[in-house]
Amino acid sequence: MSEKHVHGAGASSRRMVWALVLTSTFLVAEIIGAVVFQSLALLSDAAHMLTDVVALAIALAAIKIGERPADDLRTFGYRRFEILAATFNAVLLFLVAGYIFYEGMVRLFDPEPVGSIGMLIVASLGLGVNLISMRLLASGVEASLNVKGAYLEVWADMLGSLGVIGGALLILATGWTWVDPVVAIGIGLWVLPRTWVLLKNTTHILLEGVPKGLSLDAVRATIAAVPGVVAVHDLHLWGISSNDVNGSVHVSVVEAGTEDVRRRVLEAMQTDHGIEHATVQVETGPDGDPSGPGHGETPHR
């Protein structure tokens, strides 16, 4: 790892810590404001801000935990922590959204008084926190997928804060308290599809599905086209976290030079599909039986 890369990771970590502190502090303040001013829209926005806090925490943890080496108990290291935390985040959001939808429907038919001025002040402060957090994270967006994900979460929450501000101004101008649950339900509808995508993606990774952007048939065809390969079987592609790819495959050959074939297969998988960590087992013999010197090799690249 280059010194430049280390310094870049350290700078991103420090900026994420500041963004996490700001967002977490305001999350507590927004929940208090939602209770004091009886605003369901603020509570809904707080639920969305919770995703920002979790996204920032996951991104920060991924950097810190990712630096820990694999050990005798966790041979793949600790990268899956990111996926477990993201799955928990998605499930929690579904539960919170269910409560907000239920409470929103109740308030539509039986509106409650809302402190629109307090609601406006809290939402405006939330918008400021979002803008500051976005500024802190902007420099690391291109260097890290985790930072980019956290940045997009904060960006989406900024839109939620704008919705609450608009709702507060409308209530202040008209006295229509039913606007508050409508805004809350609207924010929930905005968050839920993204939450579903998050849950679907994390579940796919936990089930060790083929990583996004890869085709099992395409990878199989690439390997089959390598000179010396006569058959491809037991091909598996999976990821431990959101930004890595692992592969394993058995290839059959009928000629000598199994090490050259193995090397060419690894190069083709990396060059054509970006699979940098792969295990290739070579089977030799006229019928592809595992009888030659290449059988049992599990080289990694």
Image (tube, helix red, strand yellow):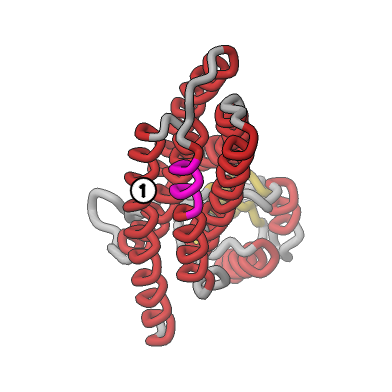
Percent from the top left, x then y, of residue 136? 46, 70
Q: Residue at x 62, y 64 (%)?
A: 274
Relative depth, front residue between 201 and 112: 112
Relative depth, front residue between 221 and 139: 139
Is residue 66 in sight in this rendering? yes
Q: For the N terminus, give its image quadrant.
A: bottom left
Q: Is residue 110 above or below residue 223?
A: above
| Residue indicated by mark 1 | 81
Is residue 192 in sight in this rendering? no
Toward which corner of the image does residue 46 lie, by quadrant? top left
Q: Is residue 301 above or below residue 193?
A: below
Range of the magenta residues? 117-124
By secondary structure, the bulk of the magenta-drawn segment is best described as: helix
Question: Could you say whether the residue bearing mark 1 is in a helix, strand or loop?
Answer: helix
Q: Is residue 36 left or right of residue 222?
A: left
Percent from the top left, x then y, of residue 21? 32, 59
Percent from the top left, x then y, of residue 296? 45, 53
Q: Residue at x 46, y 49 (%)?
A: 121
Q: Residue at x 47, y 41 (%)?
A: 119
Q: Is residue 257 left or right of residue 2?
A: right
